[in-house]
Image (cartoon, helix red, strand yellow):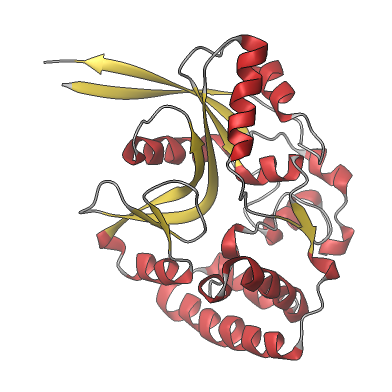
Amino acid sequence: MVKIKIRILRKKFNYWYPGTDVVKEIIDNYGKHIENGDIIVIAEKALSTALGNIYDEGLIQADMLTKIFTFIIVRILWLNLLKFVFRNRETIQILSSVQLNIISAHKKLSLRYGGIKHFLKPVSEAGIDTTNLPYKYVSLPLRDPAILNSIRAEIFRKLGKYVNILIIDTDKSFKPRFLKRVVFATRPSLIKGVIDLGAYIYFTGRILRKCFIPYPTPVAYNGVNIGLPLILRIAKICEKGMGSGLGRNIMEMLKKIGKEGLEDIMWLDMAKVHHYPVLLVKLIVIRGN
């Protein structure tokens, strides 16, 4: 019988501003510990920010139709569902306190990136992330898997080590208890077996809790085949190790840095806490009878 033990190495990083040399940061922190076959797990929002894959939602002018539908979906449908069905006070506070025009702009961008199934989701639509960024910037989901191959190649060139790269996001995915190699995600993913159902699984996964096991979403993977079940295990462990930086949502972020509104948040505020955007994972094979 073969069991696989997952060992995590966790080190602090400075905030990754746009233009950050990601490979240099990884090697500076983990270079002495990297061995052939290790898995480097990276938070998508940090990687997107470093690559400049961000967008200023302040540039979006939400039309009246978008505002109307946003009001119906957010202020009426989801606030009532969250209050009487899911009993999620944290999300209720976000949706009820953030100005409707700001939410509408975010909804318009999510519709453009993910379509109606993401527009209908209450928060974190289409993998677009509003946390750990200043002003009205958001990080966009990664769409080009070639970046993972570039990171692997550059690490091999500098260290002579073959590594695997896994990108994860805190947005939830739900694995049916009766299926091993399929997981339904609330956002897009480039990994085979991860099926994006957007708001539909966000709702279903919370209603039928006993039918699903929740995980963070594995967004992309490049390396030797280790199978979806192990990828999900690694993602779940690493999500805890990475933490939430300045906060899990807008309200937490504002509270942590002592600001009242999005327009008050600056790039320098991002450096007020330590960040853990990368974890080094080592797989230990244990053979038994």
Which residue shows up at 47% across the image and 55% down it?
172
The correct choice, above or below, for 150 with respect to 190 in the image is above
Q: Quadrant of residue 125?
A: bottom right
Which residue shows up at 88% across the image and 43% down it?
268
Can you name the residue that lies furthest to the left here? 289
| Residue 206 x/y as whole percent | 38, 66
**Quadrant the N terminus occupies:** top left
Which residue shows up at 25% across the image and 61% down it?
211
The correct choice, above or below, for 270 with respect to 276 in the image is below
Comparing 76 with 90, the one in front is 76
Q: In the rendered picture of this protein, how many numbered marks are placed on residues?
A: 0
**Quadrant the C terminus occupies:** top left
Q: Quadrant of residue 282?
A: top left
- Evaluate whether residue 23 shows in this view: yes
The correct choice, above or below, for 151 with respect to 155 in the image is below
| Residue 131 x/y as whole percent | 70, 54
Residue 216 falls left or right of residue 59: left
Which residue shows up at 50% across the image and 73% down it?
117
| Residue 180 x/y as whole percent | 25, 46
Residue 139 falls left or right of residue 36: right
| Residue 63 x/y as whole percent | 76, 86
- Evaluate whether residue 31 shows in this view: no
